[in-house]
């Protein structure tokens, strides 16, 4: 079994075991496919999980307890087949552990990604536990949605709307690293899509609010995708700076290495999370398809 399908009255989704990657969100009433389908010309991914790091890591390596380890952009989870741990008609939990990978990695871990359908909402919940005394990591998602979502509309007809009960800050890149963790205030909260926005890679926003929302929509159409972050620190918006027919909503908990921080020591990095064997990690990104 390479794929698993989940469905309810409104939606049917498909997830690959390889990478636990979401490949389809299909509206059963309107016959709308929301997920980008690779065409052999543009991006060849659809929804890779980012773990145990997000973005660039300096020198493609890090050190921990005096030992050096190789690493790569966005981590290794997307490159392995997960185990289907549990499932029903409208939910499925996928598991990846340190025993299932071929990486030289210093932590014992269990990474679970649970997909749950609830009406027109899909919850993607991330769980990380460790048997090691401590663990450092970053985690995120990268789902790509079709743009346009309807016939007769163009990429430029769509807008991104941000919503938060607290200040929103825009974080800048000094490619391939993050310029700073502070960013600058972003009062606009809405912008029109065009491919030139992405010549400097991802647009990255963060909010201190526990509920940070982004919406992809067009004033000329009826279809939209809304993402609600619960316990996740930042939202990336990305596509390729050409004519690619998709845009990604990227929930990020953790960041690329900082441009002005040259430490290789994982324990000293400011862009990663820390848990212990007594403090597991959990967060959810919810996607609403209308």
Image (cartoon, helix red, strand yellow):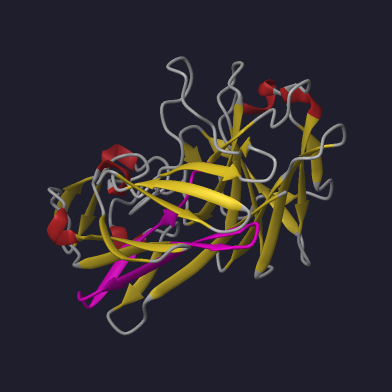
Residue 257 can be seen, yes or no:
no
Front in this rendered view, residue 92 or 74? 92
Q: Is residue 119 magenta?
A: yes
Residue depicted at x 54% and y 32%: 36
Front in this rendered view, residue 288 or 102? 288
Q: Quadrant of residue 110?
A: bottom left
Q: Position of residue 47 (x, y in %)?
A: 45, 42
Residue 126 can be seen, yes or no:
yes
Front in this rendered view, residue 260 or 28? 28
Is residue 166 placed above or below 58 in the rendered structure? below
Q: Quadrant of residue 27?
A: top right
Front in this rendered view, residue 148 or 169? 148
Q: Is residue 126 magenta?
A: yes
Is residue 67 placed above or below 112 in the rendered structure? above
Given the current orientation, which residue lies at the most extreme right position? 219
Q: Main secondary structure of the magenta part?
A: strand
Residue depicted at x 70% and y 51%: 214
Q: Position of residue 103 (x, y in %)?
A: 15, 49
Residue depicted at x 73% and y 56%: 168
Is residue 129 placed above or below 84 in the rendered structure? below
- The magenta segment is 115-143
Q: Position of residue 120 (x, y in %)?
A: 65, 57
Is residue 107 placed above or below 154 in the rendered structure? below
């Amino acid at each position: 079994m390479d794929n698993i399908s989940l469905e309810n009255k409104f939606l049917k989704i498909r997830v690959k075991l390889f990478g636990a990657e979401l490949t389809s969100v299909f509206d059963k009433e309107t016959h709308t496919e929301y997920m980008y389908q690779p065409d052999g010309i543009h991006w060849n991914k659809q929804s890779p999980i980012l773990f145990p790091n997000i973005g660039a890591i300096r020198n493609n390596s890090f050190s921990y307890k005096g030992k050096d380890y190789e690493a790569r952009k966005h981590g290794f989870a997307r490159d392995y087949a997960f185990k289907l741990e549990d499932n029903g008609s409208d939910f499925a939990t996928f598991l990846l552990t340190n025993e299932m990978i071929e990486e030289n990695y210093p932590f014992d871990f269990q990474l679970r990604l649970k997909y749950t359908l609830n009406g027109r909402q899909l919850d993607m919940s991330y769980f990380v536990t460790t048997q090691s005394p401590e663990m450092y990591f970053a985690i995120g998602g990268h789902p790509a949605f079709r743009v346009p979502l309807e016939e007769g509309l163009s990429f430029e007809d769509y807008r991104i709307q941000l919503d938060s009960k607290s200040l929103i800050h825009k974080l800048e890149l000094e490619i391939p690293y993050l310029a700073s963790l502070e960013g600058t205030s972003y009062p606009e909260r809405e912008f029109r899509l065009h491919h030139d926005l992405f010549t400097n890679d991802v647009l990255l926003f963060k909010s201190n609010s526990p509920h940070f929302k982004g919406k992809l929509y067009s004033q000329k159409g009826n279809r939209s995708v809304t993402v609600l972050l619960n316990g996740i620190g930042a939202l990336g918006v990305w596509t390729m700076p050409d004519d690619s027919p998709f845009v990604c909503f990227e929930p990020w908990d953790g960041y690329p290495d900082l441009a002005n921080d040259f430490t290789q020591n994982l324990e000293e990095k400011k862009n990663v999370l820390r848990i212990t064997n007594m403090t597991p990690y959990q967060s959810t990104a919810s996607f609403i398809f209308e």
